[in-house]
Image (cartoon, rainbow, N blue to C red):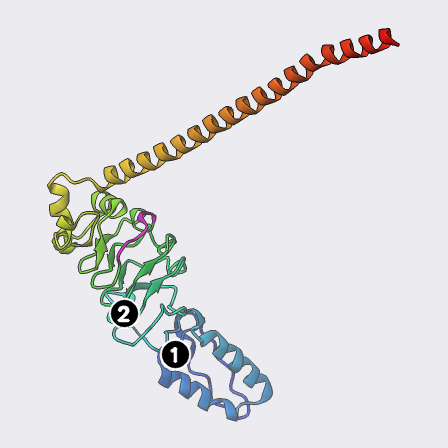
Amino acid sequence: MAAVLPEHQGASLLPRSCCRRQGIASSHAERARCKMTLPAMPAASLTQACFCLLLCVPWGSSCPPSCQCTERAGAKAVLCSSRHLEEIPRDIPKDAVFLKLDANSITRIPSNAFRHLSHLEELDLSRNAIEKIDRAAFKGVAAGLRTLDLSSNRIRSIPKEALLALNAKLRLANNPWHCECALQEVLWEARLDPDSVQDITCHTAPREEYVGKPLLQVLDAGVNFCSVRQRTTDVAMFITMFGWFAMVIVYVICYVRHNREDTCKHVDYLKSLPSSQGRAETTSTAL
């Protein structure tokens, strides 16, 4: 919306470029020139100029102080590489399409960390110190995200719900993975970058022979971590059921034994009654 202030008492006109593109100033220099004209304006014109400047301020497109915002192929790119960040910035522009947070010291991706970035297509979190990823870490960007780079971090395990909802191409290489069922399901169902699949290795595993080997190679050999977990669950359930069954048997035995003792005592009491009554009758006859 262009705003032109009428000339009044020799005041300078507010340049049209100041409020170009729906109130967004084209450059810092033009905004500075806008502000330089204000002191010469009367009160009414000054009020109009201030209103125009408020429209000119790009409130929704501010760039985090530790990042650089630019355009790439006509889309907004937010570059925060190697900025010593320990957490994900909260003031990332909502219209960001490319977001680079690589080579920092981020340790965790909390829930809804990127929920407001509905236009996000590429996300680079490689070469950080990420250890924990929440289940809803990528909620809100799952549909549009095309590339997600989590390589070269400290990720040992990850909730499958965090990744299986994504349509993005994943890079998970060079992490100290613990080979388990959840990681196996991610490898089978998620869209992994074919160039980095061989670099997903087992740093730890249920059996020592799998350590240090690519996960894909272990799975190709016929290993199924999900079936191992299922067997473990079955054994635990069997032990639990056996414990309950044993407790029921012990309770029944104790109950029967207790009732038997009470019955014996009652029988003995009943047997003692006739002899007592006979002695009483004999004593009465003697008198």
Sequence-first disc among 2 and 1: 1
* Residue 229 left/right relative to 213: right
Q: What mark, if any, has residue 284 been given in the picture?
A: none
Q: Which amino acid does label 1 sit on?
A: Ser
- Span colored in magenta: 156-161
Residue drawn at (39%, 64%) of the image: 94
Screen quadrant of the N terminus: bottom left
Q: Farthest residue toward the top?
A: 285
- The x and y percentages for residue 123 are 27, 61
Residue ID for mark 1: 17
* Of residues 216 and 90, the one drawn nearer to the viewer in this rendering: 216
* Of residues 87 and 266, the one drawn nearer to the viewer in this rendering: 266
Helix, strand, or loop for circle 2?
strand
Residue ID for mark 2: 71
Q: Which of marks 2 and 1 is in front?
A: 2
Badge 2: how crowded within 10 Å, few (<14), some, or many (20+)?
few
In this view, 93 is above or below 248 = below
- The x and y percentages for residue 12 are 47, 89
Q: Farthest residue toward the right?
A: 287
Q: Which amino acid does label 2 sit on?
A: Glu
* Of residues 27 and 252, the one drawn nearer to the viewer in this rendering: 252
Screen quadrant of the C terminus: top right
Q: Quadrant of residue 47?
A: bottom right
Label 2 to label 1: alpha-carbon separation: 20 Å
